[in-house]
Every structure is written in C-alpha cells, then in structure tokens.
Amino acid sequence: MSTRKNGVHDLDLKALRAATAFLRDERACAPNAAVRAVATALGLDDQLGDLRLRMSARLRGTLGDDTGARKTFDACTRPLPLKSIAAQLHLSLRQFYRVRDAMLERILSELQRTDGVRYAERSDDASDLLQTAIRMLSRGHPEEADRLTEMLVTAGARASLVARALSVRARALYDQGLESRAHDALTAADAASGSDPAAAMDASFARSFIEYRDGRFSTSLPIAEGALHAAAGFMPSSPADVRARISHLHFLAIQHQEGGSNARSVQLFLQARALLNELSDPPKAEVAENLTFSAISRLAIKGQSHLAWTEAHEALKLARWHGLDREQIWAQLALARVAVSSGDVARAVAFAREALAQARSCLAGDELCRILTVNTRIEGAAGNGDVAVERIEEARGLLGKLRPYLRPIVFLCEADALLTAGRREAAFDSAQRAIDALERMNQSHYIGLAYITRAQAKPNDRRNRRDSIEAAIDYLRKGGYTVDLARALDISAEATGNAAQAAEARDLRAAALF
C-alpha cells in the first residue's frame, strides 16, 4: 500500500482513498495502516490529536489554486454517505468515483513530484498551514500550533507570513507556559513585520492575547482596540488579510463579551460577518463561530434571546452539515444557554451533555475546561448538583495546565455546583476564593456570579447577604446574562422588599422568552 524510495513514502491511490474515508468518517477513532502511511508521508505524527484536521489541511494544500479540485476534496471529506456527496456535486455515483480519483491522482502526482509537502513553496499552502495552526490553538493544542508555526518560520516562507507565524507562535508558547520564549517570538514578529500593517496588527493582537490569558482586561482591551483603530486606514484585500482581520474582530468581540461591553461585542461580530460575506467562499468554521459567539453576547442584552436562538441554531446546522466538531460543540452550548434563559432547563441539559460528549473526544486544555465550566453552570441551573460537582471536578483536574485567568472561573463554577448540591460552607469558601482572585485580576461581570453564590450560601447572615447581592447586581449590570441579573434582583427584592427590583426581574425574564 505504501513503499519507501530513498527514505520518502511513495503512496498509491488506494491509500489516498482510505485517507479521504478516514477524514469523512468521524466515528473512526483510530487510523488504519493505510491512513498511518499517508500521515507518515506527510510528516504527521498520528499519535497527536486532531489528525483529521492536520491531514485535511495538508492534502488540500497540494491542490494549489485549482478551485474545482478543492471543491471536490471538500465534498469528499464531508461526514455524509457517498451517494449524498455525489448528489451534491450533481453527479451519478459512477461519475463521482471518476472525479474523486482524478482529484486524488492530482494529489498523488504533486506529492511524488515534491517528495512531500513543502509549504514554503506556495503562499496558499503556507497560508493554509498557518490557519491550521490557529485552529489547533483554538482547540487547546498549543504544542501542535507551535510545531506548525515553527515549520513556517524555518521553511523560508515570505516575510509577512513569517511575521504572522511568529505572532501565532508567541500565543502558542505562552499557552504552554513558556513566557520568555513567547516574548522573544513577539520581538521577532515586530522585527519581521517591517512596514506591513497586517503583520504589525497580528503582533499587537498577540500582545493583547497574552494580557487576556492572564485576565488583565484593563490592558488587553486597550491594546486590541488601539490596534484596530491604528489599522482603520488599511483595508484588507487578499483573502489571507481578510481572514486575519476577521480573526482579530472575533477575538476583540470575545474580550468584550467577557470583560467589556456586550453591545460592542455584537457590533464587532457584525463587522466580521460583513467581511466573511465578502469572501467568495467564506470558511464555514468561521461563519459558525461568528454566529455562535454573537448569540452568546446577545444573551446579555435585554430582548435579544430570539436573535440569539436564531444565530446559534443556524450555526449548529452549518457546523453539522460541514462536520465541524468544535463549532458544533459551542453552538450546542449557546443553544443550551438560550434555553436556560427561557426556562427550558431540560432542553438545555440535553444540548450541554451532547456537546460535552463531543468535546471530550477532540478538545483539550483550556478549551475543554471552558466546556466543562459551562456544563457545570447548566447542570446547576437544572438542579443537578451531583452532576455539576462531577463536571467541575473534571475541570479542576486541568488546573495545572491552565493560564491564571481560567482558575477563578473554575472556582466560581465550583461554588455554584457545591451550592446546588447542598454543600453551603464549601460553596461559600469557593465563591470567596473566586472573588478574591477575580477582583485582583479584573472587574469582569463574572464576579457577580460568585457574589450571588456567596449571598445564597449563608442566607441567615443578613450583612453578607445584603453586601453580596449589592455587589452581584453591580457587576452583572456590566455585562452578565440578563437571566443572572434577574436572579440577583429577585434575591435582593426578597431580602429588602424592593418592588422596583422585583418588577425589573420579571421584565428581564419575560424579555428572555421567545
């Protein structure tokens, strides 16, 4: 099936057919011998995570500018029966086999011609590799992102691409705890950027990313907003520049979602969506991501739950059709959050559990930890205290690998889980630990959630209850979900008899229905 000539694997058509079948079938947990042969020939370690993603990017990269062949490759790797794929291409099954094999012959010829895949030789290939590195980073695999960007830096790609690769590498190194090397990579990115405004913007956003990873919104947000303002006169023209701008807008929007203005977050997502629509073939993963996280931001804006549901539902349909596992996971969690806001906790739990089952098979590190914290909150909202505690204990097992910012988030979710499970003293301690850590770090609306738990953990301590709920309302008004603000207002109204707060809580809940 695969032989070696002068140390280079010589593949055959049968092996490449097996590889496309592996890419299409998400249920296949382990690659067979033919797929491993393809991976080896491409220089891929089949023991690392997300082999499908990395193999797909490299095989697709061999097709260069041939949009027809790339369209066929994309169709062949969708998680659908071959008859359905053939129908989408308006071909009979017999015609489809011929078209597929012609595309695979093209790949085989290119691999044999170059003795492997050399990404520095074509800018499109190098750009694809960089996008794969960014995607690996978002999935919680910084080691693999580091390795891929190092390949670009050392392979002689064009200067602007090297500068961008160094910025991505700085993020990957920082997520591995290699802070000194991350700052060295940023310095190298600055030097490589020269007068390229796109590369300079990448370096600025990498700096913002590092501050964000340590929870310092007071510095991360101004850096990113400043970089966006400085680039106002630079309109991205190439698809690579457009995708980079979209990525930056998404990152800034998520920062606002977590520590700034949700109205600004939605505005940024809409700007990114307009750029996505300008691309001739918008990357479906980025479209789904845009819709999903815009939906999450809308849950903090009164009266936008129906828009949140529409966006998240569209994201899920898109992600399922194109077999985008990470995007399916987050779209389901967004739908779960919308369901919680509207009071449909059974539906929320169903979405959350399906998302977690998928996440455990393809995500790692802080990305998996985030999924677990969201699951903890949803199980807690449904009253499933023991399950919520199990989820957060799993998240705690990842703490040693996480940047500082996520640790207090784990503590506040732990507090909520313990409270739901009836362990009030432990819940109070965890809530206080989250408050202390977050207030030293930033002034995020997440702190309000910890204060709610602290208020409910000692209901007979009137001073604690009063002070905690006042703080909770103050923080949640900065950007928390409207359903959480309503919960805080209800607790306060019950304690103080404040009719205005009770009315506001009812109004917020009514606006969350759709």
Image: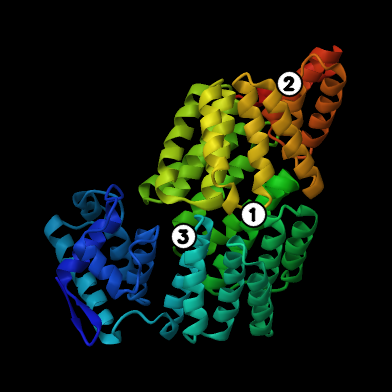
In the figure, is residue 329 to the left or right of 174? left
The answer to which of 295 and 42 lies nearer the viewer is: 42
Say which residue label 2 marks: 456
Q: Amino acid at mark 2?
A: Gln
Q: Secondary structure at mark 2?
A: helix
The residue at 54%/50% (across/down) is 367
For disc 3, the marked residue is 283
Q: Under tag 3, what secondary structure?
A: loop
- Position above or below: 51 against 396: below
Residue 191, quarter of picture: bottom right
- Coloured how? rainbow
Q: Which residue is mark 1?
A: 403
**What is the C-alpha distance between the residues marked 2 and 1?**
29 Å
Locate residue 414, reporting x and y percent: 63, 33
In the rendered structure, which disc, 2 or 1, sits on the residue that comes first in sequence?
A: 1
Q: Which amino acid type corresponds to the residue marked 3 in the rendered image? A: Pro
Residue 309 placement (x, y as % from top left): 54, 35
Q: Residues within 10 Å of mark 2 (few under 14, many from 20)?
A: many
Q: Is residue 291 left or right of residue 224?
A: left
